Image: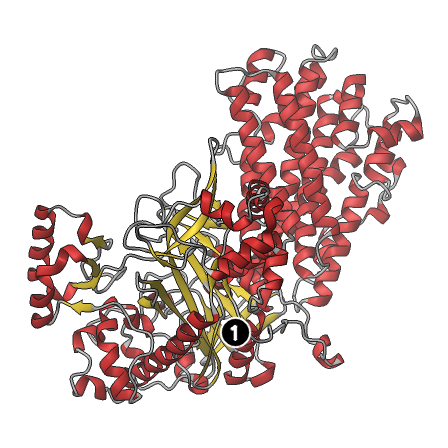
């Protein structure tokens, strides 16, 4: 029997010529090589049976990514839409203790240099005066924030999270390629990678002594807490640009994992030079902000005036020393590739040390000598923009010289000569190649792919940093050397091995006092409250339209399709609820035209009341509060929407508007909505956010059912057998009615069940009673002038069967219709009042950023 190591060698192509082969532990070259010791150990723990099980593990990996909802937003991806599943490879990148020792020491040294550079350029600027840094790279950089000059950061540290992109060269040594300081991404994705891969290879993960990650995250949060103005009692928030940002998944993931409040700029306000969070309970202080937003968008008053993502007055609060922002605004200039060329001299000047972890040779072409030195060797280099992603400067995608023709090289040389300061040239490094598993249809095999490792240093206290043992490994596609997730790259877990004891620190805090526990009540931001409110409304609206569409299609194909009152009622309801356009002929006039119009509009996203629109609106609202939803709840929402549109497109692709197929799709959607409702009812904490979700649902239900019942009496449908049964079906009360009243068609019995019976969750009495209770409970928890809002809704305790069943001379039910009209009106009035007070803050004072 072949050993696992032999199987791996047989299936693994060697790395490309000139690249270090991670699997074999040496540069690729002629002749056969054995597996590197760490990889031999990995495959030995996998075993021969496990090796033959890799395809199943790969399928399990993809399923976990899908089930966990791990996504990466790709704006230019038209095939898969803006959200696509996170790409993760099966095999980890394995880093030996010896390699990690070099990386860890080098990264810690480099972050100390960058910290001192920040302190100087925003302080005495001696580095500029002595010519160790060109002014163009500092004061000429759009990321240099003049409003922050002279400002000492709260806690004495500028850089709390710094990332370094490393690549291993053919000689086996690691090199720094770039550095990220504004808002480095990856801390959330690498956690998800670790969670998935460690479960797929549990024996190897445990036996190989892979270093754990939790201690570093604990150090980060504890450090921010200690350095913040409030100390141990600090309220820390994570600032995100919102759900349309490419890495929003990890913003929500990190906020949940670290126990932070996830906020957008609109959630925050500055009053008297202090930062506050808008919540249902009023303004709550924020003492520390972990930002995932580029600096230029932070404060529209002092930075980009067109920013809708930041907080007016935030820089003023920072200058006043009232809030810690990680990282301190103004670090964007450190991200310029050109900065790498000056760091060796800076390290000698600032630390008196040589850099332990070298960077690739880098030339800033704003210096004539550097430009003249590098122009003849462009074919062996990479050309990068000096000020990437900034306005007012020439920005472009990096180009690899060896991939360019002679003519293209000459053109780039001309550009560099004309605008030298806009261009930085870096030596080309053939990155090491890591084994990746490819479960192709024809043959499963191990394929080498170029890899880059992003390593993070996080501040554990003033001027103290821990290096995360591992990082985010990014893998290039087969046809290029650029490890970009936006351009189709993948990722891998990074296993750092240790010869010592594995640190098993967790983020659990078992020693909270009763007072601390009492103060841990989750805050509900106004933005989250509004999205939860509309999540409830759209959920109920989707259920109502699905039930109405099913009822209508069933009736159009049933034995009562010729009943004028029933058809008039259903036509009116379909039109008033947007299932058909007002111009569509009534069901009795043109049944087939009416039916086709209804089916054709089910999945329309232009019609603001269609089933498809409501399902998409549910997903949009839910994405804004994803950190508050269980993974099962989110998966149910995504699956319901995707499945509905997929099945609708299948049966309408060739003009087939079959009511049978439409009913099947609606039935499936109804089942999915039941699961979604169950998640909202049974899986969410009963805080004020959930109460607003419930209030939204019941307002929607009250308006829909009351209006539908009124229309049923106005049209006379209720007095026909078909209409009577249809009304029970619309109220989802058929089984209950027949159990209590057998085959009765008595209007009084109907009204007693669907209007007065407060034990029936679909009756108006139950809806109103629940709604009044939710509103009263909310008013108790939230300081509000709307304490009597529940009184705006008719009190079901005062409803009497005799009164609502009383008929006038024309056989109408005046008291009932008046009650239904008041219920519909109350639903609209309460909705407006809730929105005006809790979401738009119409009664709140104007912004004041202080003197």
Q: Secondary structure at mark 1?
A: strand
Give how far across and how far down residue 252 sits, in percent.
54, 59
Quarter placement of the N terminus: top right
Q: Is residue 546 above or below residue 306?
A: above
Q: Quadrant of residue 138?
A: bottom left
- Mark 1 is surrounded, within 10 Å at the Cα level, by few (under 14), some (14 to 19) or many (20 or more) other residues, namely some
Q: Quadrant of residue 530?
A: bottom right
- Asked whether the viewer can see residue 810, the reply is no
Q: Is residue 833 left or right of residue 480?
A: right
Residue at 70%, 41% in the rendered image: 675
Quarter placement of the C terminus: bottom left
- Who is closer to the viewer here, 597 or 129? 129
Q: Is residue 790 left or right of residue 471?
A: right
Q: Is residue 256 left or right of residue 721?
A: left
Give how far across and how far down residue 68 sits, in percent.
59, 50
- Who is closer to the viewer here, 617 or 347? 347
Residue at 71%, 79% in the rendered image: 512
Residue at 70%, 31% in the rendered image: 708
Q: Is residue 177 above or below residue 692?
A: below
What's the coloring here? secondary structure
Residue at 72%, 13% in the rendered image: 558
- Asked whether the viewer can see residue 259, the reply is yes
Give how far across and how far down residue 453 sits, in percent.
40, 62
Q: Is residue 405 above or below residue 121?
A: above
Q: Which residue is mark 1?
A: 276
Give how far across and how far down residue 275 sits, in percent.
49, 76
- Who is closer to the viewer here, 182 or 703? 182
């Amino acid at each position: 029997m072949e050993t696992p190591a032999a199987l791996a060698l047989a299936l693994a192509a060697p790395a490309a010529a000139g690249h270090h082969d991670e699997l074999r532990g040496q540069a690729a070259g002629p002749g056969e090589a054995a597996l590197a010791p760490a990889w031999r150990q990995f495959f030995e723990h996998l075993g021969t049976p496990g090796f033959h099980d890799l395809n199943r593990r790969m399928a399990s990996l993809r399923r976990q990514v899908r089930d966990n909802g791990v996504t990466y937003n790709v704006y230019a991806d038209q095939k898969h839409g803006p959200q696509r599943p996170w790409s993760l490879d099966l095999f980890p990148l394995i880093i030996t203790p010896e390699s990690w020792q070099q990386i860890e020491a080098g990264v810690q040294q480099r972050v100390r240099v960058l910290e001192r550079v920040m302190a100087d350029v925003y302080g005495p600027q001696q580095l500029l005066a002595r010519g160790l840094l060109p002014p163009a790279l500092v004061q000429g950089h759009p990321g240099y924030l003049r409003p922050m000059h002279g400002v000492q950061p709260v806690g004495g540290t500028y850089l709390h999270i710094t990332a370094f992109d490393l690549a291993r060269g053919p000689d086996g040594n690691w090199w720094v390629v770039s550095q990220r300081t504004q808002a480095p991404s990856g801390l959330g994705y690498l956690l998800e990678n670790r969670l998935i891969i460690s479960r797929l290879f549990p024996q190897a993960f445990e036996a190989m002594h892979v270093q754990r990650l939790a201690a570093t995250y604990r150090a980060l949060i504890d450090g921010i807490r200690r350095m913040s103005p409030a100390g141990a009692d600090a309220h820390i928030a994570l600032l995100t640009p919102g759900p349309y940002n490419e890495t929003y998944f990890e913003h929500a993931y990190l906020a949940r994992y670290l126990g932070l409040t996830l906020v957008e700029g609109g959630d925050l306000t500055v009053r008297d030079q202090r930062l506050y969070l808008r919540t249902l309970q009023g303004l709550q202080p924020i003492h520390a902000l972990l930002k995932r937003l580029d600096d230029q968008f932070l404060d529209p008053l002092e930075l980009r005036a067109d920013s809708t993502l930041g907080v007016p007055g935030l820089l003023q609060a920072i200058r006043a020393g009232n809030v810690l922002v990680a990282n301190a605004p103004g670090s964007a200039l450190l991200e310029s590739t050109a900065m790498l060329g000056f760091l060796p001299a800076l390290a000698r000047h600032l630390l008196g040390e040589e850099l332990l972890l070298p960077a690739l040779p880098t030339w800033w072409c704003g210096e004539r000598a550097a430009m003249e030195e590098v122009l003849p060797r462009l074919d062996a280099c990479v050309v990068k923009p000096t000020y990437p992603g900034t306005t007012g400067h020439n920005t472009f995608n990096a180009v690899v010289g060896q991939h360019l023709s002679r003519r293209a090289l000459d053109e780039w040389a001309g550009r560099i000569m004309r605008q030298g300061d806009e261009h930085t040239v870096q030596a080309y490094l053939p990155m090491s190649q890591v084994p990746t598993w490819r479960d192709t249809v024809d043959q499963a095999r191990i394929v080498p792919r170029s890899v880059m490792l992003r390593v993070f240093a996080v501040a554990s206290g003033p001027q103290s940093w821990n290096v995360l043992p591992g990082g985010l490994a990014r893998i290039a596609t087969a046809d290029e050397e650029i490890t970009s997730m936006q351009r189709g790259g993948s990722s891998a877990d990074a296993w750092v091995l240790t010869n010592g004891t594995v640190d098993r620190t967790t983020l659990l805090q078992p020693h909270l006092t009763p007072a601390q526990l009492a103060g841990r009540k989750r805050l509900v931001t106004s933005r989250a409250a509004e999205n939860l409110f509309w999540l409830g409304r759209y959920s109920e609206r989707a259920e109502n339209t699905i039930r109405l569409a099913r009822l209508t299609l069933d009736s159009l194909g049933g034995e009562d399709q010729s009943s004028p009152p029933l058809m008039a009622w259903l036509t009116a309801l379909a039109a008033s609820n947007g299932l058909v356009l007002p111009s569509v002929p009534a069901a009795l006039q043109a049944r087939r035209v009416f039916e086709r119009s209804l089916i054709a509009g089910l999945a329309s996203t232009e019609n603001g009341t269609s089933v498809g629109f409501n399902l998409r609106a549910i997903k949009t609202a839910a994405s804004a509060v994803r950190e508050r939803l269980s993974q099962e709840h989110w998966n149910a929402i995504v699956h319901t929407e995707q499945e509905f549109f997929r099945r609708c497109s299948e049966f309408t692709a060739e003009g087939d508007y079959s009511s049978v197929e439409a009913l099947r799709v609606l039935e499936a959607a109804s089942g999915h909505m039941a699961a979604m409702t169950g998640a909202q009812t049974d899986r969410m904490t009963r805080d004020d956010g959930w109460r607003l979700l419930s209030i939204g649902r019941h307002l929607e239900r009250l308006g829909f059912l009351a209006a539908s019942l009124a229309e049923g009496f106005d049209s006379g449908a209720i007095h026909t057998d078909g209409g009577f049964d249809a009304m029970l079906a619309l109220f989802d009360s058929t089984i209950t009615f027949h159990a209590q009243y057998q085959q009765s068609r008595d209007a009084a019995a109907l009204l007693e069940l669907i209007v007065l019976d407060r034990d029936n969750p679909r009756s108006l009495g139950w809806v109103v009673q629940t709604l009044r209770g939710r509103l009263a409970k909310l008013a108790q928890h939230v300081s509000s002038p709307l304490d009597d809002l529940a009184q705006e809704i008719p009190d079901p305790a005062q409803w009497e069967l005799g009164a609502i069943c009383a008929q006038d001379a024309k056989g109408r039910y005046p008291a009932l219709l008046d009650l239904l009209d008041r219920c519909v009106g109350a639903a609209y009035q309460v909705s407006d009042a809730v929105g005006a007070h809790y979401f738009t803050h119409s009664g709140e004072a104007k912004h004041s950023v202080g003197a």
